[in-house]
Amino acid sequence: MTALLDMDELLDTLEQGVRNMLEIRGVDNPAIIGIRTGGVWLADLLGKRLGMTEPRGELDISFYRDDFSRIGLNPRVRPSSLPFETEGRDILLIDDVIMSGRTIRAAMNEIFDYGRPASIMLATLIDLGARELPVQPDVTGKALSLKADQRVKLKGPDPLHLELREASQP
């Protein structure tokens, strides 16, 4: 396993992209939701960098996955926490890595169970492409192309760093 990319540079790019997107869309108070686990770490960091004081939401999308019946329950599943109303809110959804789009679809399904937001904006640290669903991030720290046997994993929370692994590594 090897260290991958400069985390400060990625976070700066992601922060600036989110600031620009919020300005263009005229959104000044989005509710921030992170997808466990890496998305929660990033949501906390981004919220602080953006000067947002409202508590962040956390989603554990385990029960919303479309492959739940095939892969079973993650032994570390915890309840989601959304300490704010989602109805009519602009939501900033944060995840660490997007690939197929299935995690984001599951997260949106769960958010809609809490209420109908005005909008959902998606920010991801890493975009690996390879979509199976028509889901695209609004803001990305970096797009990467990996070999078929490679995986990228966000580790943290302190310090946050990315690792590149061969598929056979734990």
Image (spheres, rainbow, N blue to C red):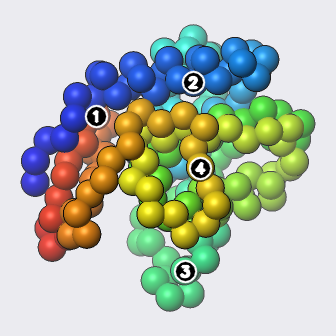
Q: Residues within 10 Å of mark 2 (few under 14, many from 20)?
A: many
SS at badge 2: helix
Mark 1–mark 3 distance (CA, rounded to whole Å)? 28 Å
Question: Which residue position holds label 3?
Answer: 67
Question: Which residue position holds label 1?
Answer: 160
Q: Looking at the image, tell me whether mark 4 or mark 1 is earlier in sequence order.
A: 4
In the orientation shown, which residue stands out farthest toward the bottom? 70
Mark 4–mark 1 distance (CA, rounded to whole Å)? 24 Å
Q: Looking at the image, tell me whether mark 2 or mark 1 is earlier in sequence order.
A: 2
In this rendered view, identify the residue nearer to me: 47 or 121: 121
Q: Looking at the image, tell me whether mark 2 or mark 3 is earlier in sequence order.
A: 2
Identified by mark 3, the residue type is Asp
Q: Looking at the image, tell me whether mark 2 or mark 4 is earlier in sequence order.
A: 2
Mark 2–mark 3 distance (CA, rounded to whole Å)? 31 Å
Question: Which disc, if any, is residue 135?
Answer: none
Residue 42: image x %, image y %?
45, 34
Question: Which residue position holds label 4?
Answer: 136
The quarter of the rendered structure image containing the N terminus is bottom left
Say how many tags the image has.
Answer: 4
Question: Which disc, if any, is residue 18?
Answer: 2
Q: Residues within 10 Å of mark 3 (few under 14, many from 20)?
A: few
Please state which of the two labelled residues, at mark 2 or mark 3, is closer to the viewer: 2
The residue at 56%/87% (across/down) is: 69
Identified by mark 2, the residue type is Val
In the orientation shown, which residue stands out farthest toward the top? 51
In this rendered view, identify the residue nearer to me: 20 or 162: 20
Q: Looking at the image, tell me whether mark 1 or mark 3 is earlier in sequence order.
A: 3
The residue at 14%/41% (across/down) is: 3
Asked if residue 50 can be seen in this view, the reply is yes
Mark 4–mark 3 distance (CA, rounded to whole Å)? 20 Å
